[in-house]
Image (spheres, grey):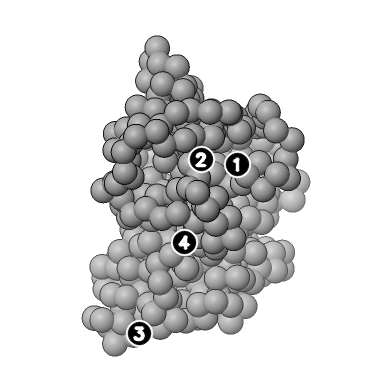
Amino acid sequence: MPPKPKISPSLICWFRKCRRDLPWRENRTLYRVWVSEVMLQQTRVDTVIPYFLRFLDRFPDVSALAKADLQDVLKLWEGLGYYARARNLHRAARKITDEFSGIIPPDPERFRSLPGVGPYISAAVMSIACGYPLPVVDGNVLRAVCRIFALKDDISRPSAKKKVAALLTKQIPETQPGDFNEALMELGATVCTPKSPRCTRCPLAKLCMAKQAGIVSELPVKTPKAPVPEFRVVVAVIRNENGQILIQKRPENGLLGGLWEFPGGKVEKGEAPAAALERECREELGVKVKTGREIATIRHAYTHFKILLTAFHCRIEEGTVQSRLPLKWAEMEEIDTLPFPKANHKIFPYLRGHAVSGREQPPGT
């Protein structure tokens, strides 16, 4: 097997000349780097930028974040997705206040003890902000490294990630580990892209083993994902005599934890949407409802599944509302101040009368 080329000199030189002007690359405090890396997990840079700026404006340091109410944190995170990241960031800030005298621990072992800090976040933050030579392996890095070194391992398997990490451990320089990691991520995001990689612009073109072998388009190897399932979901818009709408808060842990939503749930196989909603309200709220006019039907995509969600006007016919989850009757003005899932937001225009009534099935986002 031919020796692996040394890529750090060319890569870092290119990065310093061509790197994008991003807000978290200014005033590189440990806190700013940490927040940016949490937001950037599985999320595009262009999407993150406005969220990062708003978040830092509201919570400029770890002390401000620790003092914040979780609902305020989730509201600022609203629409960014993967809400466990926000909950863990908030929990970590409070742990730093309680256990580390308000100072983010600047060493990998103690930093890893914080909620939500796994191998990727630890390596990224500790290398960029503190200078530890820890390689970062994300999707962009996996793709670029498999091409640079002509690796034919299936990147959907954990063994491929471990192999790439071990390889990069030998490549990462002791003196500029943060620049090296950022450069590799930047290369994968802007040059060594999944389709139509810009090989003529690549600083490693002469070193790239896949290019030399003419197999760039064949790498990386990845097992195709199984088709994403779609579920039918129904929610109830129930108003009281004052016109307020009934909403409930999801459990703190789990999917969309801590966010508010309209009551409802999944339609079971062979079940009519109206019957499913009446069952869900009986089980969740302890009341008998009458399903009325459909408000809207929208599509929404999550990472591992899609939903076709229909909202109905509903009326309580029997019983008193009670639930194991926090409930409240809220005006639309208050609903606007609370964190809701993005799928629920697609219903809001219909409740305000700003959208054409009837069925709507836009692509999920």
Mark sitting earlier along the chain (4/3): 4
- Distance, label 3 to label 2, CA atoms, is 45 Å
Residue at (40% x, 24% y) in the render? 276
Q: In front here: 307 or 8?
A: 307
Amino acid under label 3? Ile
Mark sitting earlier along the chain (3/2): 3
- Distance, label 4 to label 2, CA atoms, is 23 Å
- Distance, label 1 to label 3, CA atoms, is 42 Å
Q: Disc 1 marks which residue? A: 347
Amino acid under label 4? Leu
Camera-near label (4 vs 1) is 1
Asked if residue 168 shows in the view, the reply is no
Q: Disc 2 marks which residue? A: 237
Q: In front here: 212 or 164?
A: 164
Mark sitting earlier along the chain (4/1): 4
Asked if residue 272 shows in the view, the reply is yes
- Distance, label 4 to label 3, CA atoms, is 23 Å
Amino acid under label 1? Ile
Q: Are marks 1 and 3 in contact (CB under 8 Å)?
A: no
Amino acid under label 2? Val
Q: Are marks 1 and 2 in contact (CB under 8 Å)?
A: yes
- Distance, label 4 to label 1, CA atoms, is 19 Å
Q: Is residue 58 above or below residue 313?
A: below
Camera-near label (4 vs 3) is 4
Camera-near label (3 vs 2) is 2
Q: Disc 3 marks which residue? A: 103
Classify the position of the N terminus by image quarter.
top left
* Number of residues whose C-alpha sits closer than 10 Å to that of mark 1, classed few (under 14), some (14–19) or many (20 or more): some
Q: Disc 4 marks which residue? A: 74
Q: In front here: 75 or 46?
A: 75
